Structure formats: structure tokens, C-alpha cells
Image (cartoon, coloured by chain):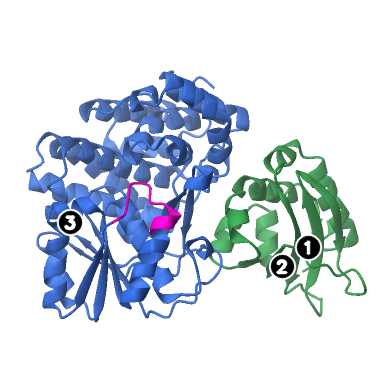
Amino acid sequence: MSKFMSPEWAKAFKEALNNNPVYAEAARNWEGDFYFTATDIPGASKPSTMYADLWHGKCREAFIVTGDDDERDPAFRMTGAMPVWRKVIEKKLDPIQGLLTRQLKLQGDMVTIMRNVKSAQALVNSLATIDTEFPS
Amino acid sequence: MWFFRAPTIAYGDDALSHLATLEGKRALIVTDANMVKLGVADKVCGPLSVGGMDVQIFAEVEPDPSLDTVNKAASMARDFDADWIVGLGGGSAMDTAKMVRILAERRDLTAMDVNPVEPMGLRGVVKLCTIPTTSGTGAEVGWACVVTDRAESRKLVLGSMDSYPEVAIVDPALAAGMPAWLTADTGMDALVHAIEIYTGLWHNDFVDGPALQAIRLVFEYLPRAYADGSDMEARERMANAATLAGFGLANANCGLAHALAHSLGGVFHPPHGRTTSVYLPYTTEYIIREAPERYADIARFLGLPGTTDQERAQALVAAIRELQATVGHPTSVKGLNVPEPEFRESLPHIVEAAQQDATMFNAARVPSTDEVERLFEYAYAGQPIDF
């Protein structure tokens, strides 16, 4: 089990995607990197962000952004409070409904997202396979 | 957290007269050439003018409206400085009107900028009224706009949840002129909406009731409206059924039959309602092999026979097929006059497009790539689902 938004969790995220043939197939045309940011993490003084480089069905790189010299300028940024991420990861909230209700906020080229619903869904399903420990 | 949203609905006999009470200066009617030719647009202009509005008409909406059409209509709305957009017609006209309403206020955007995820920042400067002239799309009470990207031969679900119509006018007299085939196409579309909403993963307490009532109304009144277009009781109940199902579209989601129909429609452009009607029994047979419970609920509500959920769900499939036969619908995609060589050639594309359709993942059983292809194949050939 790895702590949400820890370096181990980012590593598990990368492995979950790269070991998922459904994701590989669904996202075979996907090109675009992400910042996934969680706010309102209990005990944390600031939001936590994971960078993920997603490229043609594979995750080439995933790490927790510390803000030293590892900041990037990703094509997409998805932000939500930790309890919302938890619901998504535990498959209690459909990520599309999360976006429509703006519990999750997404910045980037929406046309690309709306043309790749299947890969987004497969990505979230991969997230759900990570054994995650959430701070309380 | 989720929402239930609905516009004010003026319905029933003489509902169109409500237009005279709308407060504004300039109304742009977004419709198709046929509505002008048949004099329906004049019936809308009249009460708007009585209410003191200047009125212009954009009558170039085509079936499966394109992004170009949306941008052209938006340009007219901006030039006219419209403060009301009136969508008059079927789903194509009303969906175009929804996009135009956003683009008339947000002059910095184009059609492709409109999406349901980002706030559109509308301040109510331009309002929207929808007036269906068919009984099926439910577009009058929803936010989604289905437009076609001709360059990619693909339908896109755009729109914004910030742009629900302020007013929907559901006047059964407007649907009375529909020919029997259009009554059938649109009526079956309403049925598919209601069944997919009730059985979809996004179903909720607020849409379940309207969906069930819509299903009951379609089974009872579509055969009458189809057989006798002047049966005004049947026309009114079908108009109501379409709008009730529309609540579900606006506040839940369609499912697998729509995903298949959208992708086939993006290439071959058969009538939307007829296409969803053809796919519904196949997608239902596929889903109920693993998740029959909600379909069995519907069967119970309709009083269909069966002692187990599986038997009841199968009885619902049989009832759908019987209704299809009653209203003269084909039972296979071949019957939609989709030529087999072109179908085979486009199969990889439509399989891919179906899987990227936002309605696909609302189904209680989501097919794999291989299963999507088989669903297309079986529905083309008219073969019952066995997987």
C-alpha cells in the first residue's frame, strides 16, 4: 500500500498504466502530459501535484512535483480536493460526472479530451487498481 | 453530488401563445428551411412580434448540423444583436440554437471552444427558448448539443451545462403535422432515451420516475400517433413522453445504443431515431446477459410477463421488437440502407468512434473493442446477441 501522492504512489501509478493492456489499447493515440493536483489533503500545508507523461498508451514518466527544479508545463492540468480524488480512485464517482459538476477542474484542450473519452476512462480504471492509503 | 435542472415548460394546448410573454428586444429563430416552407416559423414569429420583439430567422440548419452551420448562425445572431435565441424544429435545430445562444453572448469563442467542463461565463445576456416540432429528441430541456465534424466524419457532443433553455414550449399542435415515418423515428428515439436513462449507470431518483412514465406513454400512445396523426390525445401524450425522457438526457445520460448510433450516424447519416431504435434490442440483449435487473424493473412496470429478472428483461426486448414492427421500423442496420461494402470498409472507424463516445460508459455492461465490433456486425446482419 502506498500513500496518496507519495513518490511510491507515483511509481505505482506508472506501473499500473504500463501493466494495463486495456489502457494501452484505449490510449494508443493519446499524446499529452498531465499535472494531477490534489488540494485539501489532511495534514498538508499545500496542494500536492503529480506529473505524468502519457504517450501512446504508455506512461513514460510519473513523479511528485516538489517545486525545486522539476516543474513542467503540461498540456493538461486536473485539480480536485483529496476527498474527490478518493471517490474517483475508489470508483464511487464517475470522473466525467466529477468534471461536469466541477468537483474536478480540467485545464487544457477540451476537444482532445472529448475525443478521447475511452482513454480517460481507462486511465481512471488503472488508478483504481493502486492500493492507496489516504491521509485522514 | 449531482444536479437536476429543467427549464420552465409551457405545455399542452395553445402553449405557443406563451411566446408573447417573453421579455426581450430581438429574437433570432434558428430552424430549418422546411419549418419556413410549412409556415411553422410564421406561427412563432406572430406571438413574438405581438410581444414587441424584432424577429429574424436563420433557416439553414441541416440534419446532423455541422460546426460550420453553428458558426454561421452564431455570426447572424451577433450581427443582429439578438437577446433571445429560439430553437424551432427537431433536435438538430434546437441543438444548433443552444450553441448559438452561447456564442451570441461569448463573442470571443467558436463552436469548438464550447464544452461541458469549463464554465462558459454566461451572464444571461442572451436567453434561449426551445420549441420542438417533433416528439422524440428531448433536446428542448437539455444542455447537450450534438454537432457533426464533417472533416472527421464524426458526431461531437458539445454544449455547456451553463446553457439550459430558460423556456421550453411543448405544443402538441406543432407535432401534428409529422408524417407517420417521422412520428415513428422520433417516438422510438424517446423510448430509447428513456430506457437507456433508466438502465444507465447515471440513473438517479430524479430521472427514474420521468423515464418510466415516458416508457409507458410511448408503448401506449406511439402506435396510435403513428396510425392516425390527427389523434391529438396521442400527439399530446407523445410530446409529453419525449420531454419527460429529455429530463433524463439533461440530468443523466444515454447509453450503448446511442454510442453505436452516433458513430454509425457520423459516417452514413441514417435518421437518428430510426438508428437508435434498430440498435436498442441488440444492446439490451447484450447488457441483460450480465445486468438484467433494471430492464426487469421496466418490464414489471409495463406488466410484461416473466418470473425471473432474465425472463422479464427478455420480455422487454420482445416488446420493443413488437413496437418496432408496429411502426414499420427495420430490425437490422442493413434495413437502414447502409451498403455492406461501405459498412465493412468503415467498421474500424465506427468501432473506434463508438468507444470514444461519451454515452458508451454509461452502460451497465461496457463492451470490449472486440465486442463493440461484434455488436455492429450482429446488428447489421439482424442476428440475436449470443455473447
The colour of chain A is green
Calculate the distance from the C-alpha at mark 1 to the C-alpha at mark 3.
61 Å
Q: Residue furthest left?
A: B230
The three-letter amino acid code for the residue at tag 1 is: Phe
Q: Nearer the viewer, mark 1 or mark 2?
A: 2
The residue pinned by badge 3 equals B36
Res B375 label = none
Residue receiving disc 1: A134
Q: Is residue B270 visible?
A: yes
Magenta region includes residue B64: yes
Image-based side of A135 in relation to B267, left or right:
right
Say which residue appears at 39% left-offset and 29% top-offset.
Answer: B281
- Say if mark 1 contacts mark 2, CB within 8 Å: yes
Nearer-the-camera pick, B114 or B381: B114
Amino acid residing under circle 3: Val
The residues colored magenta run B60-69
* Closest to the observer, A66 or A42: A66
SS at circle 3: helix
Question: Is B75 placed above or below B347 here?
Answer: below
The disc at residue A82 is 2
Q: On the rendered structure, is B266 left or right of B239? A: right
How busy is the neighbourhood of tag 3: few (under 14 within 10 Å), some, or many (20 plus)?
some
Q: Main secondary structure of the magenta part?
A: loop
- Between the residue at mark 3 and the residue at mark 2, the CA separation in whole angstroms equals 54 Å
